[in-house]
Image: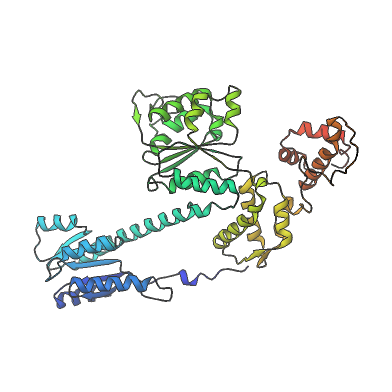
Amino acid sequence: MLKLNRSDEVQTACERILVVDDDPIVGESLRDFLIAEGYDVSTCLNGEEALEALAEAERTGTEATSRVRPFNLVITDSTMPGMTGHDLLCRVRETYPAIVCLMLTGYGTIEAAVEAIRDGAFDYLSKPIVDSELRMAVQKALRQQALVAENTRLHSQLSQRFGLRNLVGGDYRLVKAFELVEAVAPSKATVLITGESGTGKSMLARTIHAQSNRRNQPFVEIHCGSIPETLLESELFGHVKGAFTGAQADKQGRFLAADGGTIFIDEINSASPAMQMKLLRVLQERRFEPVGSTETIEVDVRVVLATNQSLEKLVAQGRFRMDLFYRINVVQFELPPLRDRLNDIPLLAEHFIEKYCREHEKLVTGISTEAMQSLQRYPYPGNVRELENAIERAVVLSRRPTIELADLPPNIQDQSAPMIRPGDQEGPIEDGPWEPIPLSEALKEPEKRIIVKALEANGWNRQATADQLQINRTTLYKKMKQYGLGETG
């Protein structure tokens, strides 16, 4: 198994501390103690020197070949000639927010301590310094700094994962969607995302949230189709103890959990008429009552909804409220199925290869022509999600720098010839007199070819074939019998 070289990412060096005191004896004493505690320590005699040292460490620390790292902690005296410790504290907080500061003073008053904390110091110590107090204060401050750094790193990862650059594709409909995200994300407008399962509706919802001014607030996701109707109301709005059998304690609903942020309601098409009515009120008023309670709760929530069925058709059939449809259809994104954007498959494949090479520590640099041709011939009933799973499988199984046909799932390997779809024909229509025939007769041969190709692609698995053709299994059996295909299966 080939692995990426991760040695440059591993750092085991100790935390860096900068001690700032105009008394060199105090500075050297603190340095010696902290070095004995296992820290990397530097000293400065005044605030100006400290700012230069911080800037130099920050600059060299970003260079790929440098072994110098930025400081984690600043310990500064409060009273110094020129720039005071309080002035230095404010400059550090403004310029290097990830660095934590401790303040030292020879005048241990409550007023001085309050002023130091207000200026941004993590803690405040009085001279003469007690070793045990210093040790504990430094440990707490560095734990705080580590939490701040981890929080910053996670926010950066979320931004990268759900940034616009992760919406991969050159299809004109996707390009329009990308442009619309940038326009819509900063607003409070309700968003409706339509598209088949696996087209990336959840990713788009998270991207809208990540690009909005709510990005640092909760993103809460709920799938209506996966929750029984009897529990959906409680999941959305919460309940109080004793509201129903089994409600042994109060429960917070998803709307309240998303207060200040974004709630993504997937498969809204599966909500019952009663639930649709309750959702309409929440969308209009941003208020609701938990199950079993008379207390009204108000929330500030951005609502993004998704459906894998046409809501217009459901409205026409009387299965979806017209007023709710117009309330949620403020801004609509339509994600096309992958089979309608085959030119995006190479871009997506490259994106997923890079992603899973990092995740599984593999070194795969490309994909063979034969494998790519099969990928582009496959109809993808599972859309982008199915392609992603296929690429992850190929990356894991590949023993070469290039993904080969044999690394792909068997149903994709079988795409040795383009899938014939309705409207396709084996050759051009010849010029000459045209003799009309019944349409049902004209469609028999193309329909037979489609069924045969689908059966071959699915290894003659009838259930999988019926699912792929979006017909029920009984209909498939009748068609197979009609075209004499029963013996083959």
Instruction: Report the residue at 14% width, 57% height from top.
Output: 113
483 to the left or right of 107: right
Q: Nearer the viewer, residue 86 or 142?
A: 86
The quadrant in which residue 94 appears is bottom left
Residue 216 in the image: x percent, y percent?
37, 48
Q: Residue at (53%, 25%) from the top-left corner?
A: 272
Residue 287 relative to residue 127: left or right: right
> In the image, what residue occupies the spot 63% across and 44% down?
337
Which corner quadrant holds the C terminus?
top right
Whether 308 is drawn above or below 139: the answer is: above
Q: Is residue 381 above or below residue 36?
A: above
Picture coordinates of residue 469 (x, y %)? 73, 38
Q: Answer with left or right where residue 119 lies relative to residue 409.
A: left
The reply to whether residue 433 is in sight is yes
Q: In the image shown, does 375 or 5 lie closer to the viewer?
A: 375
Q: Residue at x 72, y 41 (%)?
A: 468
For the N terminus, the image quarter is bottom right
Tell me where residue 475 appears, x and y as whole percent: 78, 31
Q: Is residue 50 above or below residue 227?
A: below
Pinpoint residue 397: horizontal percent, then vertical percent.
66, 61
Position of residue 428 in the picture relative to residue 395 (left or right): right
**Where 408 falls versus 17 (above or below)?**
above
The answer to whether residue 38 is visible is: no
